[in-house]
Amino acid sequence: MDFHDSPAEAAFRAEVRGWLADHLTAEYAALGGVGGEADETGWDVRREWERLLGAHGWVGLSWPKDHGGRAASFAEQVIFQEEYARANAPARVSFFGEGLFAPTLIQFGTDEQKRRYLPKIQSVDELWCQGFSEPNAGSDLANVQTRAVLDGDEWVINGQKVWTTLAHRADWCFVVTRTVEGSQGHKGLSFLLVDMHQPGIEIRPLRQMTGSAEFNEVFFDGARTPADHVLGPVGEGWSVAMATLGFERGTAFLSRQLAFQREMQDLIDAAQKNGAARDPLLRNKLAGHYVGVKIMQYNGQRMLTQMSRTGAVGPEASIGKLYWSTWHRAFGETAVQVLGTDGLTIRNDAPYELDALHLTFMGSRAETIYAGASEIQRNIIGERVLGLPREPR
């Protein structure tokens, strides 16, 4: 694969770089690249920045032109992410809407649904959250127990979701729910679109050791959504949800490697500043992490090649998810080693201050669990990529 820009790609890169130079100013530039998909730091400023991106066609970059997008190629999408990270622009707030729901909607939605939802995602007037995990259905999504029953021309929803990121910020939720009475496993599920601003929905924050509460429990007690607010056929939501997870584990996380490169440099700078870089064992670990970022980069390019040939992300996406989450967890541990005793000295009284390296360590502990636990990813790779016998059920 040729990693050099073609003339057209070089022109696109210059366009992105020029736009960012012109618009990434004042409070947007001051905020920098803080935060992440599940982080609320600088939320109001980041949302205004996202509106500016949307107004200039950078939200929905890959969407077809007749849906308001630019129909950007895979190479152009990567170029945008590279330049965005290089400019240290604010973390995006529309990850679940633009990154997960929109590509699923484009693949499975009706024309009417696309006309209804895509413009609101692009203008950042509506934010989305993901209603998949439940207390007894995490990586085992087929064990979903939330149920919806038709009552006239509406679905009535009862059940509980958990670890719902930014549910308290969201206007809508795409909810995997059981709609066929007596169904089990992946059969009889539907992918419902639910307005979060209604009676019958209670959101409870889950406060973490970082002091933040971006995750939530969501309780549905007679919540309603119109009968046509289903993505894909009724009872066939499993295939729709699997497509969404493909975007979550694949294309939506391609930009992570760019953030990891910045974290890598920050850790090297910290090690050089406090003298930890003089320790040969730590230097060896840092070198290993640097190699890991490069491996991620090439895995991402391989995934893009697969997408450009087939138009879809296959089970190979699990390789990328397993790799980056395992790498980042080990990286977080090294970050604490580099900090030394400073890594253990935070105030006992909440709310306490955490620096970026503390947050990296704490946040990375969950990454081998969410978006598909590592054990599940290994099963997918073994069974669906390598063709090994299925694990005994």
Image: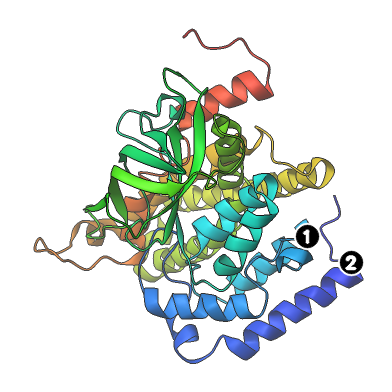
The residues tagged by marks 1 and 2 sit, at their Cα atoms, a distance apart of 10 Å
Q: Is residue 279 above or below residue 323?
A: below
Residue under label 2: 6
Q: Position of residue 299 (x, y in %)?
A: 68, 44
Q: Quadrant of residue 233?
A: top right
The structure residue drawn at horizontal position 74% and vertical position 48%, both measured from the top left corner, is 304
Q: Position of residue 392 (x, y in %)?
A: 49, 7
Residue under label 1: 75
Q: In terms of secondary structure, where does tag 2 sit? A: loop
Q: Is residue 204 above or below residue 273?
A: above
Q: Is residue 160 left or right of residue 140?
A: left
The structure residue drawn at horizontal position 57% and vertical position 11%, both measured from the top left corner, is 390
| Residue extending farthest front | 152
| Amino acid carrying mark 1 in the image | Ala
Q: Position of residue 197 (x, y in %)?
A: 34, 60
Q: Are marks 1 and 2 in contact (CB under 8 Å)?
A: yes
